[in-house]
Image: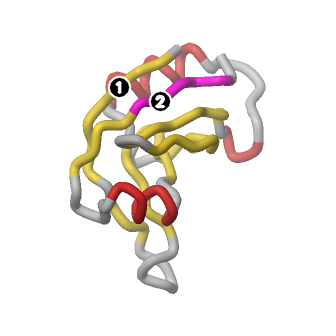
Amino acid sequence: MVVDFDAALWAWVAERPDSWTFVSLPGDLAEDIRELAAGPRRGFGSLRVRAGIGGSSWATSIFPDRTHGYVLPVKRAIRRAEGVGPGDRVTVSLELLDL
């Protein structure tokens, strides 16, 4: 399953201001994934994905989140390569590998 969506990058506020940056999956997509991925899953309920923003792609996982449905971490190297940061809107390509 491959999907594209637009979302804003946001920073998770933790002890360090630049510790983690995410995009939230749209609510309807998160619901669809939750239904498709019913059953045993990996640690923290994560699902393996291949993600892309602009000309960059990487392997990672999406994680369930009570507030956002599912969140996708965006690596610092990807943000630098694409010249984006928290508050910027990006188009994400997401291939779900665990379904």
User: Residue 6 at x, y = what percent?
Assistant: 26, 36
Give the residue number, with chain letter if any, for mark 2: 94
The image quarter in which residue 39 lies: top right
Type of amino acid under label 1: Asp
Residue segment shown in magenta: 93-97
Tell me the element at label 2.
strand
Residue 96 highlighted magenta (yes or no): yes
Label 1 crowd (10 A; few <14 / some 14-19 / many >=20): some
Give the residue number, with chain letter if any, for mark 1: 4
Q: How many marks?
A: 2
User: Residue 8 at x, y = what percent?
Assistant: 26, 50
User: Residue 21 at x, y = what percent?
Assistant: 43, 62
The image quarter in which residue 25 lies: top left
- Do the numbered discs 1 and 2 sit on residues whose CB atoms are within 8 Å? yes
Q: Residue at x 52, y 59 (%)?
A: 75
Type of amino acid under label 2: Leu
Tell me the element at label 1.
strand
Magenta-drawn stretch, dominant element (helix, strand or loop): strand
Q: Quadrant of the C terminus?
A: top right
Label 2 crowd (10 A; few <14 / some 14-19 / many >=20): many
